[in-house]
Image (cartoon, helix red, strand yellow):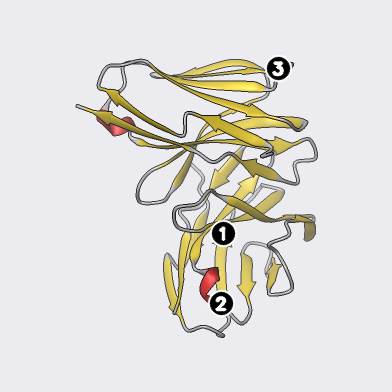
């Protein structure tokens, strides 16, 4: 069964550092998404990406965040100048009507 | 008011019990997803519904588009069903998925 893969599974970084989270979505999917879940809270939508550009973004997705599909397969989320409150699980998903989630990348900002 | 709400927030059941988790939403949707999140954090899609009813093993999901309501039923519950169950709606443009707060289910042997 096709799957969405995410790397790294866990990253620890110092406050102020840049982090890149990577996702390999399912190859024939058209929509790609990033979500965030702070520990103990509900999953939150960050951004959707379609046709090589951002389709919609939430109020959380400010200038600190960016997404790219640099090589036609990977889908990356970059977080610049990380803050303590960026510590969360970040999920990538691909699909459209049907969603397939990656296992998540846990980011810990110290 | 949240666009997607679930009830109950927490649920404890004895093994073998029939379980119902409810979801109501207030936006126009193209599809509704029921997701399962285990303590390790990974999310698995259980169902995608746009109308009617779907069944997979002991799980049944229904949706009433007119009433903007969906239910997830688990028959003959088992401790391995213990997880957080999340209702998520995809808005009509496919651009955005809005997640409910989740229902934490614990099934006791």
Q: Where is residue B6 in the image (x, y as percent from the top left)?
A: 55, 31
Q: Residue at x 53, y 48 (%)?
A: A42
Q: Which quadrant would residue A73 be assigned to in this image?
A: bottom right
**Residue placed under numbered mark 2 in the picture:** A83
Q: Distance between the residues labelled 3 and 2?
A: 42 Å
Of labels 2 and 1, the one closer to you: 2
Which of the labelled discs sits on residue A24, or is there none?
A: 1
Q: Which residue is drawn at 66% across and 47% down?
A: A28
Q: Position of residue B98 (x, y in %)?
A: 66, 42
Both labels 3 and 2 in a single chain: no
Q: Which quadrant would residue A55 be assigned to in this image?
A: bottom right
The reply to whether callout 3 and callout 2 are in contact (CB within 8 Å) is no
Kind of element beneath mark 3: loop
Assess disc 3: are there few (<14), some (14-19) or many (≥20) residues with their C-alpha within 10 Å of its C-alpha: few
Q: Position of residue A62 (x, y in %)?
A: 73, 68
Comparing B10 with A37, the one in front is: B10
Of labels 1 and 3, the one closer to you: 3
Which chain contains the residue that carries disc 3? Answer: B
Which chain contains the residue that carries disc 2? Answer: A
Both labels 1 and 3 in a single chain: no
First in residue order: circle 2 vs circle 1: 1
Q: Position of residue B11 (x, y in %)?
A: 38, 29
**Residue placed under numbered mark 3 in the picture:** B67
The reply to whether callout 2 and callout 1 are in contact (CB within 8 Å) is no
Comparing A38 with A71, the one in front is: A38
């Amino acid at each position: 069964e096709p799957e969405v893969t995410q790397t790294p599974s866990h990253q620890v970084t110092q406050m102020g550092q840049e982090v890149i989270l990577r996702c390999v979505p399912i190859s024939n999917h058209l929509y790609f998404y990033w979500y965030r879940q702070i520990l103990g809270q509900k999953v939150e939508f960050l951004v959707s990406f379609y046709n090589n550009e951002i389709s919609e973004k939430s109020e959380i997705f400010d200038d600190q965040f960016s997404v790219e599909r640099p090589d036609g397969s990977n889908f990356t989320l970059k977080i610049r100048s990380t803050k303590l409150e960026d510590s969360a699980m970040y999920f990538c998903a691909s699909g459209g009507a049907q969603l397939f989630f990656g296992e998540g990348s846990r980011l810990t900002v110290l | 008011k949240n666009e997607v709400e679930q009830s109950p927030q927490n649920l404890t059941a004895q093994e073998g019990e029939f379980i119902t988790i409810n979801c109501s939403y207030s936006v126009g949707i193209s599809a509704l997803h029921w997701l399962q999140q285990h303590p390790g954090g990974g999310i698995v899609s259980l169902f995608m519904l746009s109308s009617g009813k779907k069944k997979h093993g002991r799980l049944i999901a229904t949706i009433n588009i007119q009433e903007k309501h969906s239910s997830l039923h688990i028959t003959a519950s088992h401790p391995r069903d213990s997880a957080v169950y999340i209702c998520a709606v995809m808005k009509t443009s496919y651009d955005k998925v809005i997640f409910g707060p989740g229902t934490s289910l614990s099934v006791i042997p």
